[in-house]
Image (tube, coloured by chain):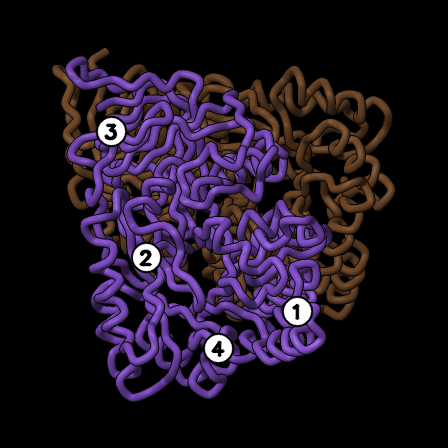
Chain colours: A brown, B purple
Amino acid sequence: MAGTVIKNGTIVSPEAAYKADLLIEDGKIACIGNGLSVEGAEVIDASGKLVLPGAVDVHTHFDLQSGDVRVVEDFYTGTVAAACGGTTTIVDHPAFGPEGCPLRHQIDEYHRLAAGKSVIDYGFHSVVQHVDDAVLRDMEALAVEEGITSFKVYMTYACKLNDAELLRILRRAKELGVIVAVHAENHDVIEHMRRQFVREGKTAPIYHAKSRPDDCEAEAVDRIIRLAHLAGGTMLYIVHLSSAKGLQVVKHARENGHRNVIAETCPQYLTLTEDQYLGENGEGLKYILSPPLRRRNDCEALWAGLADGLIQVIATDHCPFHFHREKQLGKDNFTLCPNGIPGAEERLRVVFSEGVMKGRISIRQFVALMCTNPAKIFGLFPQKGILLPGSDADVVILNPQETEILSKSNLHGAVDYSAYEGMEIQGKIELVMQRGAVLAKNNEFVGEKGQGRFLKRKRTGYLDYGVGSAWI
Amino acid sequence: MIIRNGLIVTAHEEFVGDLAIADGKIACIGNVRDERAQVLDATGKLVLPGVIDMHTHIDHWGGSAKTDDDFFTGTRAAAFGGVTTVIDFAIQRPGETVQEAVRRRRSEADGKVCIDYSLHAHVTGADEETLRSVPAIIGDGYPSFKMFTTYKKAGFKIEDHDCLTLMRHIHDHGGLVMIHAENDSMCESLTETMLRADTAVPARYPDSRPPIAEAECISRMLLFAEYTGATIYIVHVSTRQGVELIRRAQKSGLNVIAETCPHYLLLHRDRYLEEDGYKYIMAPPLRDEEDAEALWQGIRDGVISVVSSDHCDYRLDKKVAGRRNFTQVSPGIHGTEWLLPLMYHFGVGGGKMTRQQLVRLLSHHPARIFGLPGKGNIAVGMDADLVLVDPSARHTITDSNHHMQADFSPYRGFELQGCPETVISRGEIVVQGGRFLGGRGRGRFVRRNPALRI
């Protein structure tokens, strides 16, 4: 194979943005340098463009069954959308399985759902929905044999764990050296408020937000950090942090030596506010997700948290339901509306445009948050998340000069709406490659169904984000 | 030239690969296939960015004596230690303007330095001339200004009024203020008391400059920074209190950057009780072990961003003048050549930091904070300033097996694993296998930019 040379682009990593050529051979980065030329190689000119590592989305819910409804995206349509949006690796959060099922059940199920369909490389988190000796035993087998090195727990929803169960999982994870991902909201308070609003006839979408206030997030984040501390300092990954108050708890913990605490947020919490719930014609239903959208000052606090290094990852929590179908279940009562919004395809461009082009984060931070940090945290580095010699040639070429208007009509997912409809985006994804093969070009998918590979993940890499990291 | 098959360590990553160098810069990283080039086999070696020792006092007048090195011998010794850039100081002499001091130091260095260098400006007062010259000095590529809060007798000290004025002024023009933080009155009055009682002996030296003098001054400077909005850089933090104050200030959002030095991490005040305690007369003095522990913790937490040498090279014949009276010597200790070996051995080897953290402390952070373009990391297009370290090589420090002018070592008997073996400055091998291959005067002055944030 003669390979490919991407010439004259600006290559970006968390530590540098520099002009150089990139030589790709056998699906891997062979060399980075000036004036690279190889006889017979295909040449792609990237003058004036950014050459980024393929993005890593560690929080998707493809083909998820939630109660009586199923998300409208399977591993084919979902990963096509992700690929067109510049994401070349996902780590999916499987749905809850049948009550009492062993830990392996959902992993086996998701292997079936993804194999032959996913167009990008993929891994799975394992979701712990009950705790017993068998589950604790299986955690080791999954981590050691199956490359499933992260475990998701919920502090709310039907399969939530109580504090004692959380502690047992955290202790076991500490023993195994694996990371625990947590959805942190205070379940009892939320359930109480939901019932109370329904009793009072307050069933419009805005009451979804009011029933899950930021204090519920902050309390649960604080509790899980303390439980992880009790467990001996388990690596803890707070998913979809949404509020200034939640961030304050993380900040306080990290400043007081809890260096095991890692936080993720999502584009929707950075760019959308609870005003969306007030949209006419039931538009608010589009934005019913948990945690809910917050206020403008929460968005600003989260951007500041990203810039200061307090939040390490931006993922999507992609969980799409049709607005005109499943979301309408909540038409008369928000508690009946399935939770979740799409975003896998929009993530890279929304964060690039709103974050980098508006000066809230640097281009290097952008790469760290979207590519490198998630790869390191979830055991995929340096195969994924960086452009280094020997890494997989997962590459995105982005043209920062172009603008586009985000609209459902130019997206590829199966769902019938975009949460960012009409947003003006500075920057255009021109080319997406996985392992050296072009996946998407000028917003057209050109890859093959099922070309994605399952990724056996390693354990969390060493993380040394420190206080004062603004100077790193 | 191609450096083959080394473990390339950057500020945040590491990987085995080749490095191609052309025109003094890194041309290519990865699997390089140029068969014509000179090859340096780095199998089993670490390839690190050259160290940036951003705190040296080469060819320095310390108040009562001049150091024994000059810019040739000083930078040559630095190169032996894997240092490829030094930032020295243009200390103002009485009657000299800041710009005159800078010009004089340039003339002392140019033609002698064998690695690249820059200078920090030094300010002693906020007179009209100084204030007027600040933008020009920054524009000329010297965006950092050192202030001493002590050494009144040597004429270095700045008064609070002038310190505040300059802090604001320098910050407004995009410069960075560097502070030696010790309360002069405390140190002077304690010293005078000892002198009167004839007890100013090396064993009492640390008591003449106690931790509280550093804590008082750092507190005051942090409040000044809050008041003026300036970013400040505290040099050679040596105490637990100092680290804690800075940690709290950083938490509260102040832009304060901290540095420490190997001697505060590795040597303790019990040294002053030894017969040759006068060797260790430096300011701030060596502290207790618990202070050193707090400094290591500060490095781990990211409170301390830089480790430098504060190199100040006096021979024993000068140091010995302080044997009965420590005020008879100019304080200072040499060490630029040991900066990397000590930090590698005790930091990385001792499990206190990763190789990437070492690179950040010694190269990447100084380059960014002090605005050195093209230096401090390994990436395509950057200067080929590199040091190859053999991680298995061992050596024991003696009084004489180094290239500095001082005829002793405060680290005598330390057994270190991991030695700089080959040192490359802008693509040119300057040290290899214990031999100096560079040339006098081949180093260049580097015009610096204002500090970079992430």
Residue A283 can be seen, yes or no: no
Q: Which labelled disc corresponds to residue A298?
A: none
Whichever of callouts 3 and 4 sits on the residue coming sooner in the sequence is 3
Q: Are marks 2 and 3 on the same chain?
A: yes
Say which chain tag 4 marks.
B
Viewer-closest of A47 and A417: A47
- Callout 3: SS: strand
- Callout 2: SS: loop
Gap in Å between the C-alphas at discs 2 and 3?
Answer: 24 Å
The outermost residue toward the top is: A1
**Residue that carries the numbered disc 2 in the rendered image:** B371
Gap in Å between the C-alphas at discs 4 and 2?
Answer: 32 Å
The amino acid beneath tag 2 is Gly
The amino acid beneath tag 1 is Ser
Seen at 52% across and 21% down, the residue is B392
Gap in Å between the C-alphas at discs 4 and 1?
Answer: 15 Å
Marker count (numbered): 4
- The image quadrant of residue B20 is top left
Say which chain tag 2 marks.
B
- Callout 4: SS: loop
* Dot 2 crowding, Cα within 10 Å, few <14, some 14–19, many 20+: many
Q: Nearer the viewer, mark 2 or mark 3?
A: 2
Q: Is residue B11 above or below residue A271?
A: above
Viewer-closest of A351 and A73: A351
**Residue that carries the numbered disc 1 in the rendered image:** B208
Q: Nearer the viewer, mark 3 or mark 4?
A: 4
- Callout 1: SS: helix
Whichever of callouts 2 and 3 sits on the residue coming sooner in the sequence is 3
Q: Is residue A277 above or below residue A400?
A: below
Q: Position of residue B278 (x, y in %)?
A: 60, 55
**Residue that carries the numbered disc 3 in the rendered image:** B28
* Dot 4 crowding, Cα within 10 Å, few <14, some 14–19, many 20+: few
